[in-house]
Amino acid sequence: QVHVVESGGRSVQTGGSLRLSCVVSGHTRTNYGVGWFRQVPGSGRTFVAHLISTGDTAYYADSVKGRFTISKDNADNTFYLQMNNLKPEDTARYYCTAEGDTHPPKFDYWGQGTQVTVSS
């Protein structure tokens, strides 16, 4: 059974930085894509970033491009979302998700999320 656990969310001031972590355990594949989404109350989850299974290509939402970086620590199946120059509109609950075994792959496994609050 695949488990996805996020951590690192907290309150920060505008212009600050945070690094979110995502630990994926129990996956049957060695390489899989991972994504980050975010959600504010009353809205659906929106795409933030995606690191493909080979780990060499990442995609970002326009709203975070140039400020956020998704990465992977190959040693321990931990994925990161480095968030710099944070803005109040980045306030949301951030969810990590891992691709499953389907082809084409889709995000099958989700964590419970971690809250990021950016104050002005």
Image (tube, rainbow, N blue to C red):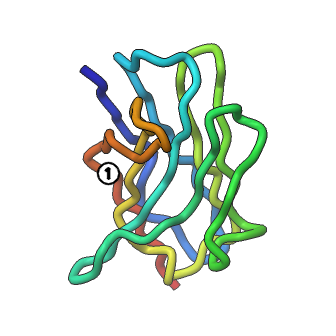
Q: Residue at x 62, y 34 (%)?
A: 53
Seen at 49% across and 54% down, the residue is 36
Left or right: residue 90 versus residue 16 is left
Q: Identify residue type, mark 1.
A: Gly
Relative to 17, is 34 on the left or the right?
left
Q: Quadrant of residue 8?
A: top left
Counting from the top left corner in percent of width and height, residue 58 is at: 71, 51
Q: Quadrant of residue 6?
A: top left
SS category of the residue bearing label 1: loop
Near-viewer residue (68 or 120) = 68
Percent x, y of residue 57: 75, 46
Is 98 above or below relative to 45? above
Total labels: the figure holds 1
**Residue at 70% across, 32% down:** 54
List the single residue furthest toward the front: 103
Q: Which sits in the foreground, 68 or 61?
A: 61
Q: Position of residue 12 (x, y in %)?
A: 51, 66
Residue placed under numbered mark 1 in the picture: 113
